[in-house]
Amino acid sequence: MLSEPRSGRLAAWGNALLAGFVSPDDAVLAIVGEDAVHRVEGLPGESAPVGLTLALGRLRALGVTGLRLALPVSGHPLGLSGPPEFNARALDAQEAVVCHGAAHGLVPEVSEAGPAGDVHVEVVWRCLPVREAPPADVPSLGEAERELAEAMRDATAVLSRLDVAGSGPVAEAAIDAYRARSEQGREVLAPGYPPRAVRVLELAQRVGLLVSLAQENGHGGAVSSAEMADRSEALRPVERTARRALVAAYNSVVEERERGVR
């Protein structure tokens, strides 16, 4: 969870484009990011892969009015609605975009080529049918914000008690450094998102980084099997909460539109 999911960028900037906040060129530039090229394969009416600009226009013509993010992992189909084939591909990629307004979904397949230091990343988005149903286990922004605050407090208390790496000043410095690097020259979310969504996304990224730091730095002071089990138990729900909050933030404009807020 250290980097922004590609499906999050596609959902956010695709929503901004669909709502008229950005131009197609600006949306595609933001979605592609540092990758070499993105293409979409399997679009209705297209026999070959097409570029993102054409694909987003075609999705709009097919009736798509919004894009939702899904971040599923084994045992937690977060943001998915079926059918099994789409869910399986999304689970394999651990991310996907689900269209609102037309029964289509997009799953990224990432490939790399080139020598170390000059690697070119290409992404093919597979367009597949989806089931039109509420996405699984996605909270509201308000729920996500409350859950994040509680999870952060509980996990920090447990990790500090166990003296686990990732719960002290070193971790805080790493978090601040990461945020400075990741936010330099980019918007946290695309235009059109409410300030609360930006706040929730930033907090979810911060919590996700804390979990990653704790996981990547060994067992810290948790030397006994019981303490290691305690640490795992503390981290598991925090990571899940952070993923749910990420999805809630990216999907907030679609949810608000459904409720008639905007």
Image (tube, rainbow, N blue to C red):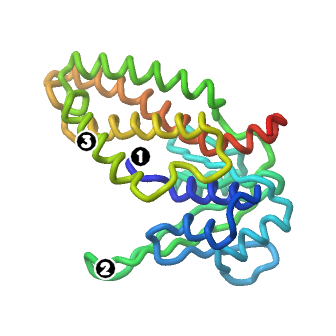
Residue at left 75%, top 37%? 256
Report the disc number at residue 211. Answer: none
Residue at left 41%, top 46%? 1
* Residue 9: image location, x then y, percent: 56, 57
Question: Which type of secondary structure does the marked residue at label 2 adopt?
Answer: loop
Q: Is residue 21 above or below residue 124?
A: above
In terms of sequence position, does the residue under pointer 1 or pointer 3 come before the other? Answer: 1
Question: Which type of secondary structure does the marked residue at label 3 adopt?
Answer: helix
Mark 1 → mark 3, Cα distance in angstroms? 14 Å
Q: Is residue 120 above or below residue 167?
A: below
In terms of sequence position, does the residue under pointer 3 or pointer 2 come before the other? Answer: 2
Mark 3: which amino acid?
Ala
* Residue 255: image location, x then y, percent: 74, 39
Mark 2: which amino acid?
Asp
Report the disc number at residue 174. Answer: 3
Residue 120: quadrant of the picture: bottom left
Q: Mark 2 — residue?
A: 118
Q: Is residue 31 above or below residue 149?
A: below
Residue at left 29%, top 18%? 158
Mark 1: which amino acid?
Met
Question: Which type of secondary structure does the marked residue at label 1 adopt?
Answer: loop
Is residue 226 in sight in this rendering? no
Mark 3 → mark 2, Cα distance in angstroms? 26 Å
Q: Mark 1 — residue?
A: 1
